[in-house]
């Protein structure tokens, strides 16, 4: 991969061709995740990726609803051939609804100040693990790159607070993030969440090269 490609990726100067390829990865990951989620709850679930955006790191909190919006986020580090970070982020109300689907009528137990019980938090952590792993599986299958996720960590707070530590850490090596919007449909109900993929410029260049959109 050339220095020019690295520079373009670092500056967020990705072209429609690159975004289309990344959107296709997201769609395949969404299909895998929908199948896994359907098996978890015993009901059909549809998922799609309506849009992929490249954001400067400082724009990320606004991209997921605003720095002060309450969200649930599952975070995994990615190591291997394309290191970086991946998060699944959902508005708190959406997260509560998803937790309810996963518990399938089970009594959740005592809830905390965020309106979530330990059982619901555990369900959301597993959900985030399934969704982010599905995205990584799609990426691995399409590129042949070796990618290993860390165990998932769940946080529930304002988006700015949750993302601050991760964004401060990655700001030394990159200045852009990929926001992959995801739409859920289950039983006629619609919900939205976001994947946030923050690779190093070299890692993103490796992904795009393996996808055949960078020579």
Image (spheres, rainbow, N blue to C red):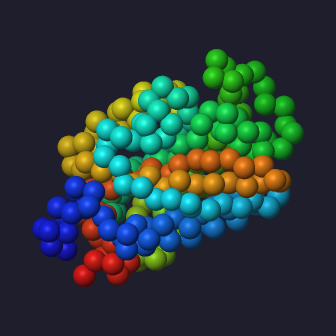
Q: Would residue 121 be visible to someone looking at this image?
A: no
Is residue 75 found left or right of 15 in the rendered image? right
- In this orientation, which residue lies closer to the viewer: 102 or 15? 15
Is residue 185 found left or right of 147 in the rendered image? right
Residue at 30%, 64% (x, y): give it.
14
Q: Is residue 86 above or below residue 29?
A: above
Q: Is residue 133 above or below residue 163?
A: below
Q: Is residue 52 above or below residue 142?
A: above
Instruction: Please state the horizontal and vertical placement of residue 59, each as a whole percent of the image.
Output: 36, 40
Quarter holding residue 46: bottom right
The residue most toward the top is: 113
Residue at 85%, 37% (x, y): give it.
106
The residue most toward the right is: 105
The residue most toward the front is: 16
Q: Quadrant of the C terminus?
A: bottom left
Count of marks, rendered view: 0
- In this orientation, which residue lies closer to the viewer: 90 or 105? 90
Instruction: Please state the horizontal and vertical placement of residue 131, each as a whole percent of the image.
Output: 59, 55
Residue at 12%, 68% (x, y): give it.
3
- In this orientation, which residue lies closer to the viewer: 182 or 102? 182
Q: Is residue 116 above or below residue 26?
A: above
Instruction: Please state the horizontal and vertical placement of residue 30, each as a whole percent of the image.
Output: 60, 63
Q: Would residue 214 be visible to someone looking at this image?
A: yes
Residue at 69%, 24% (x, y): give it.
115
């Amino acid at each position: 991969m050339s220095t020019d490609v690295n520079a373009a990726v670092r500056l967020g100067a990705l072209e429609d061709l690159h975004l289309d390829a990344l959107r296709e990865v997201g769609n395949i990951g969404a299909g895998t995740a929908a199948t896994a989620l359907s098996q978890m709850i015993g009901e059909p679930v549809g998922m799609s990726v309506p849009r992929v955006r490249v954001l400067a790191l400082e724009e990320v909190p606004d991209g997921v609803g605003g720095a002060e919006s309450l969200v649930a986020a599952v975070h995994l580090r990615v190591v291997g051939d394309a290191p970086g970070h991946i998060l699944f982020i959902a508005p708190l109300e959406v997260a509560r609804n998803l937790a309810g689907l996963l518990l399938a009528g089970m009594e959740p137990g005592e809830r905390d100040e965020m309106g979530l019980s330990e059982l619901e938090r555990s369900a959301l952590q597993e959900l985030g693990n399934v969704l982010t792993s599905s995205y990584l599986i799609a990426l691995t299958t399409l590129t042949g790159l070796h990618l290993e996720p860390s165990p998932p960590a769940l946080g529930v707070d304002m988006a700015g607070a949750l993302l601050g530590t991760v964004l401060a850490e990655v700001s030394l090596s990159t200045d852009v993030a990929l926001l992959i919007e995801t739409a859920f449909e289950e039983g006629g109900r619609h919900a939205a969440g976001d994947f946030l993929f923050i690779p190093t410029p070299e890692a993103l260049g490796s992904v795009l090269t393996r996808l055949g959109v960078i020579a």
